Amino acid sequence: MITLLTPEIAFPDPESAGPDGLLAVGGDLGVPRLLKAYSEGIFPWYNDEHPILWWSPDPRPVLLPRRLRLARRLRRYLGSHPFQVEADRDFQAVISACAVAERPGQAGTWLTADMIRAYARLHHAGHAHCVECRLDGRLAGGIYGVAVGRAFFGESMFHTCSHASKVAFAHLVWHLADLGFLFMDCQQATPHVMRFGAVEIPRRDFTALVRRAASVRAEPGKWTTPAWWSDPPAVKERARAS
């Protein structure tokens, strides 16, 4: 049964979602409602032709940060990649690039202007973060998502140079491991995320995991780029261990 949301910031039980994962319609994209949604494993996904749609798919792909799996060729590449990798330097540029990135099999983008503004507000409030790669000073790739407690929800990534999004993804997951995050939600079980070690779990188990991770107190705020990201031997060692 699909629920029509009221002004009250509340969501139905994720287990009441339809077969395709659609849970609710309506509401708003304010920071309080978005944080409430993510803390229950729910996310918005819609386009300009529809009202706000809220989803809770079953099953759900998750990646445990300390179980990141890197292909041998990528491990070697990470040890000598040409990019400058930073965290939270230009969130607006990353999400804007994600919105216009061409994706096989997709027409248009789900990142509407309202969605971009909503995630920018989350970023300014210290709850949304990005990792970005630059080549000769120009943005070449990146990934962004939402942090609630010790749960991280990956939203979108892009690249304009080969391997830039993979480099950003690896650095993000390493950072999540260092910060003690329990998991990264990948939303959709694409071949890309599954190659990195994501596994699908039932929605009921996912919801319980989210609520446990979201209950961990964590101060919101801008991420600082770890110093070791610019130290090739340190990056090479971390890649070798993944």
Image (cartoon, grey):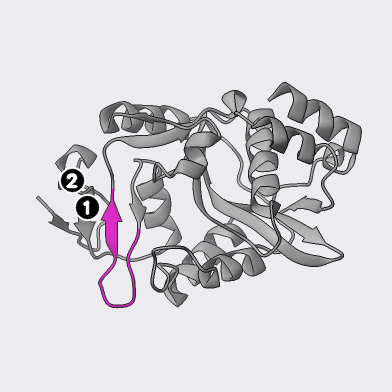
Q: Which mark is residue 17?
A: 2
Sequence-wise, the earlier of marks 2 and 1 is: 2
| Cβ atoms under marks 2 and 1 closer than 8 Å | yes
Q: Is residue 40 left or right of residue 97?
A: left
Q: Is residue 88 magenta?
A: no
Q: Which mark is residue 132?
A: none
| Residue 46 shows in this picture | yes
> Residue 69: which quarter of the image?
top right
Marks 2/1: CA–CA distance: 5 Å
Q: Is residue 52 magenta?
A: yes
Q: Residue at x 53, y 73 (%)?
A: 100
Taking depth in this image into account, of 106 and 23 the one nearest to the observer is 106
Query: What percent of the width, then of the height, locates residue 26?
Result: 24, 65
The residue singled out by tag 1 in the image is: 22
Q: Residue at x 62, y 27 (%)?
A: 180
Say how many tags the image has: 2
Q: Is residue 116 left or right of residue 92?
A: left
Q: Tell me the kind of residue under disc 1.
A: Leu
Query: What percent of the width, then of the height, locates residue 161?
Result: 71, 61
Q: Tell me the kind of residue under disc 2.
A: Ala
Q: Residue at x 64, y 52 (%)?
A: 165
Label 2, residues with CA under 10 Å away: few <14, some 14-19, many ≥20: many
Q: Residue at x 40, y 36 (%)?
A: 61
Q: Quadrant of the C terminus?
A: top right
Q: Which residues are magenta?
A: 45-55
In the displayed orientation, state which residue is furthest to the left: 1
SS class, disc 1: strand
